[in-house]
Image (tube, rainbow, N blue to C red):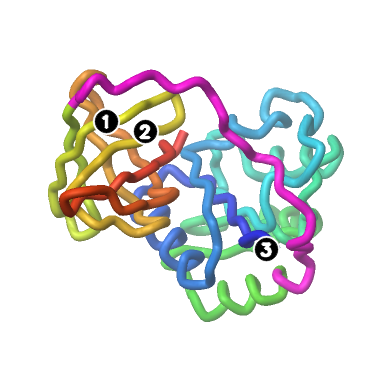
Amino acid sequence: MRKRRAIIINKDPHLQQELTGFFADRGYATAVFRDSSICSVYDSGDCTGPRSCGDIMLMNVDTPKSGLDLIAAQNKRGCKLPAANKAIIAGSLPDIGLGAAFSSLGVAIFLTPLDFSKLQQWVAECETRMDLERSVAISRREVRQEGHNERISYYMPGNRLGRATIVNKSACGVCFTTSHHLTTNDMIMLRPVSQGASEDAVVCWVRPAERNRYIVGINFCV
């Protein structure tokens, strides 16, 4: 039986971290994305996955496309994840009709700052609809390039600075060695010197290595 998987679509690093921590405490694996272009329905196509991409999905009201339009399109174009296991997160919904429209699509709505007791209640309801014997669809097995001992820096939870050496990398993730014991589902900010830009990332796995070091696999929040 696999872990439950949460899909989080939100560009706010604070919310990314809050939600990732919330689901980690419940034993979930998480996939975090800045916007909904990851979804095949985003560009007016059909759902191309043979299975659901996750067990539960929380997305920002503006994804940057309208969350309302995206969920309506997913409902029509074969999304495998039930609408009842999707939620919209918004700072406010000044248009009463907008809230009614989301409700008519079968999705939940949560306003920020999040009420985690209400979120927890909704997630528990969603879990009754999850089939953990059925696999989920997102799988990243792209070709990775050797790191050639490239050094990088990253910020850990609490804004602590860490340093690492890249083992291999791809467009979606990095494997590196470090002396810091990171934890699965930690949100970090990676600073790859060669790319000259910071990247939000999620720690996917951690393994012990020799000489008090760890091998860490991360995925960018693409």
Residue at figure coordinates x 34%, y 20% from the top left = 146
Where residue 207 sits: x, y (%)?
36, 52
Decide: marks 2, 3 in contact (CB < 8 A)?
A: no
Residue at figure coordinates x 49%, y 46% from the top left = 32
Mark 2 is surrounded, within 10 Å at the Cα level, by few (under 14), some (14 to 19) or many (20 or more) other residues, namely many
Where residue 78 sits: x, y (%)?
85, 39
Q: Amino acid at mark 1?
A: Ile
- Whether residue 96 is visible here, answered yes or no, is no
In the rendered view, does 66 fall on the left or right side of 17?
right
- Picture quadrant where residue 36 is located: top right
- Alpha-carbon distance for marks 2 and 3? 34 Å
Disc 3: which residue = 108
Magenta region: 127-150
Disc 1: which residue = 166
Outermost residue to the front: 210
- Alpha-carbon distance for marks 1 and 3? 40 Å
- Alpha-carbon distance for marks 2 and 1? 7 Å
Between 41 and 50, the one lying in front of the other is 50
Q: Which mark is residue 174?
A: 2
Q: Amino acid at mark 3?
A: Ala
Instruction: Examine the rendered structure and indicate whether residue 141 appears above or below residue 121.
Output: above
Mark 1 is surrounded, within 10 Å at the Cα level, by few (under 14), some (14 to 19) or many (20 or more) other residues, namely many
